[in-house]
Image (cartoon, coloured by chain):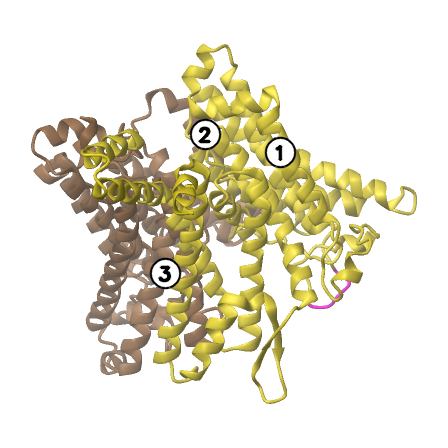
Amino acid sequence: MKEKWSALMEKEGAKTVVASLLSILIGLLMGCIIVLIVGLTNPALGAGSVWDGIRLVLGGILSTGRDAVGKLTFGFNPTNVGNMLFRATPLILTGLSVAVAFKTGLFNIGAPGQYLMGTAATLIVALSIPTASVPAPIVWLLAFLAGILAGAAWGAIPGMVKALLNINEVLACIMTNWIAANLVTWVFADSIWCNMEENGKTGYIYKTAHNGVETAKWGLDAVFPGSQVNWGIIIAIVLAVVVYVFITKTTIGYELVSCGSNRHAARYAGINDKRNIVLSMAIAGGLSGAAASLYYLSGNTEFFWSTYQSLPAVGFNGIPVALLAASNPVAIIFTGCFMSMLNISGQQLTNLTGYNEYITDVIIAAIVYLSAFSLVIKMLLTGRKKRKTAASGLDSRPAQDGRTEKGGEGA
Amino acid sequence: MTFLIRQTLIYAVPLMIVALAGVFAERSGIINLALEGIMIFGAFIGVVFVNMIQEAGVFDGAKADSNWAALQGFAMLAMLAAAASGALFSLLLSFASVNLRADQTIGGTALNLMAPALVLFFIRIIANQNVLNMAGGDAPSWFMLRKSYFGYGRTDSMGFFGEAFINQTYPATYVCILLFIVLSVILYQTRFGLRLRSCGENPQAADSLGINVYKMRYAGTTISGALAGMGGFVYALTTANCSANGDVAGFGFLALAVMIFGNWKPLNIAGAALLFGLFKCIAASYTSIDINGDGIFMLKELGISSHLYRMLPYVITLVVLAFTSKKSHAPKAEGIPYDKGQR
């Protein structure tokens, strides 16, 4: 059994999983510690709230509210699970977006901008084509495609400047993010799409349900009553599998990954590296655009259009989703659900205790921070293994080996 | 015109000082993408500091006597607190990228996510809302210079110079400009500055000459953090009425753009910051700017959306990047973790 375990730990994939789990564990622990410190030092919250807070941070998804005497109750809560799946939909897709770029050796920090462009295109198409003359499902499809295309076009810009002018894609992405934020605000400011009917909602665009365009629920509302879940999550999962097949089983996917492994070697092997960089960023952008489309086409989500001062968090949260999954498209389905589960926990925390949802953002940030050096964690795992073999006298010079390996990884 | 100068300075100076923060980190070889996050954190700590001192009533007497020198001292203390917190916060980045040789872009992104989350979590607990204001009064009445402090009456004019640079300004702005000059000189005219820059260009060579690359990179990032934290507080003080809400409206990223536009050189950065500050100022108040004093709001007559002015800095930066990428003076070793074994 022990040998089996250590043989498993030898595998690169297993190490990645352990490193990700460690990151999650430390992140959650950090969240709990903050709750503990704040609870103990803030008299308004009191020590009694600490236990409630910690339980909700760890298991908010299972929370079913408070009972008559005010104690927290836990159990299967279909509304929470449904909402988790709904919120996971855009996270999975932005995670895929970041992952595809990672595979080609690019850091797509431009997901928020691509997401915004996708949002704008989707909403404009979904609200402008009258459903009286065009069937709603066709409008839905057109809006979805418009979102993908807008995101892809926006993603292709940093891709092109990277490929043709060799400009760092991170800087180009940051610029395009803020250009998108201003552009979208500009397009929607004083436009016909602003919601003028409901009082006090001047900052919002109409929900797509206003035009009768909604993602179908087809039975999911019966399984998860009271939640927002719809078939968008199924589409997201299918897309994740499609991306997996595309990356691992097709020629173009192989070319993308080889550009990521070593751009110069790929070019030497006759792969058009420039085209592949643009393509990769366009696909990444399209996935971010799809994330926005599926989120806003649900029919009951509103878009706050005056967005020029801030970027959507969903775009940035695609980064931890991709990092935790080590850019594996199928694993992203699960890490996306995990992130949205944290999101739900935070919501429960705000509703049921004196703490608030931002603690889960702290946890997510801690996880990103830790995944920045997941390589080191992996190295530590390898190092411990080496020390163990050294102790049993199998290898006389393990420390030396460990160091040379470190040097290699640093390159 | 005086209004335009005053407002432009208010926007330009935080940009300038935070862009210099970026320069210090990048010249030592660390990409500091976390400028935005550090600004947010510094702004929060600065406002908390102001709040606490106000609650303690230390400067109430000075406020009652309109003792502006003492009040400015208070502002300087808050700036120091913000700088210290920024430096501390940036240690997270330097630890990850120097000691653990982590990916600096991801580490910086983590700090950018961390700062607003932490800050909002605490603001919500302290203030029960999403914004933390001063404990009493407002920023202009506490920290702004006024004509009356210098014996001028309500209707007296201080002359062009006085109106543009003294009346209704925050001295914090001038402290930042002074600091900007001093630090630029340090970066280019001292031994320390030369060593720091060498670590960003060729750390292997620097190490072979006995310079401790790790220490230099820590120094660069820490100075960077202190400046960004201070810049964050100055931004909150001058444009957000000394309040913190876990947001600096993308100023950290704009500062990054300023740094690139300024080609990593202090003098160019000062120019770029003024240009971008002017755009910000026009975007914020173009409907009421009367440039030549003839009573016609020319920019309003042009009818260009304020969003165009907000967008321009980013578009210009992207275009400039596109045209100058061949002769860009970005530090050669930025973003590459230094590994002694690689020499």
Near mark 2 (Cα within 10 A), the count class, few <14, some 14-19 or many ≥20, is some
Which label is found at residue A105? 2
Which label is found at residue B104? none
Give the magenta-colored segment's residue range.
A196-200
- Decide if residue A249 is on the left or right side of residue A369: right
Near mark 3 (Cα within 10 A), the count class, few <14, some 14-19 or many ≥20, is many
Labels 3 and 2 positioned on one and the same chain = no
Labels 1 and 2 positioned on one and the same chain = yes
Q: Which residue is mark 1?
A: A243
- Of all chains, the one bearing label 2 is A
Q: Position of residue A370 (x, y in %)?
A: 38, 50
Viewer-nearest residue: B331 or B283? B331
Q: Position of residue B246 (x, y in %)?
A: 43, 61
Q: Residue at x 47, y 22 (%)?
A: A259
User: What color is chain A drawn in?
Assistant: yellow
Name the image quarter holding the C terminus of chain A. Answer: top left
Q: Which residue is mark 3?
A: B238
Q: Residue furthest right?
A: A133
Q: Position of residue A142 (x, y in %)?
A: 78, 38
- Decide if residue A330 is on the left or right side of residue A225: left
Give residue B202's quadrant in the image.
top left
The residue under label 1 is which amino acid type? Val
Chain represented in brown: B
Q: Residue at x 42, y 36 (%)?
A: A12
